[in-house]
Amino acid sequence: MSSDFTKPSSPASVDTINARAIYVMYMAGLIALPVAIAAVVWAYACRDATEDEFLESHYDNQIRIFWIALALGILGLFLAILVVGLIVIVGMWIWLIIRCREGLFQLEYGEPAD
């Protein structure tokens, strides 16, 4: 019985798996904020532990994504009195999903985060 499954040319390192998990946790953090907080703590810990510049760029990107999303979320909450706050929050959600998707693709293709 043959299988269409092929092994990757090089196994994924633990750091690559960590970076991938952090991007996914950020998207899950849209529903549960403590997940995003745990993810940023994990990103800080991984960034300090890695010596690979490629992965360090991804961890820096993940940390930047968290702080920008947090700032936009707080701004959206303050502006929620006006209708524009809801637009800011929805825009932040869309932005975060796009940034995480781009980060996952760049990680998958071995490109540093931009």
Image: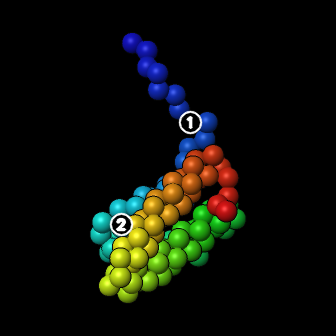
Label 1 crowd (10 A; few <14 / some 14-19 / many >=20): few
- Residue corresponding to mark 1: 8
Q: Earlier in the sequence, mark 2 or mark 1?
A: 1
What colour scheme has been applied to the protein in the rendered image?
A: rainbow
Residue at (51% x, 57% y) in the render: 98
Q: Amino acid at mark 1?
A: Pro
Query: Where does residue 2 sit, x and y in percent of width and height?
Result: 43, 15
The one nearer the camera, 21 or 77, is 77
The one nearer the camera, 44 or 37, is 37
Seen in the picture, residue 22 relative to 45 is either above or below; the reply is above
The one nearer the camera, 68 or 113, is 68
Q: Is residue 85 left or right of residue 106?
A: left
Q: Tag 1, which secondary structure? A: loop
Query: Hey, which residue is sitting farthest front in the picture?
Result: 83
Q: Is residue 10 left or right of residue 2?
A: right
Q: Quadrant of the N terminus?
A: top left
Residue at (36% x, 73% y) in the render: 86
- Residue corresponding to mark 2: 30
Seen in the picture, residue 72 relative to 32 is either above or below; the reply is below
The one nearer the camera, 43 or 104, is 104
- Quadrant of residue 26 within the rendered picture: bottom left
Query: Where does residue 39 sit, x and y in percent of width and height?
Result: 42, 70
Residue 33's tag is none
Label 2 crowd (10 A; few <14 / some 14-19 / many >=20): some
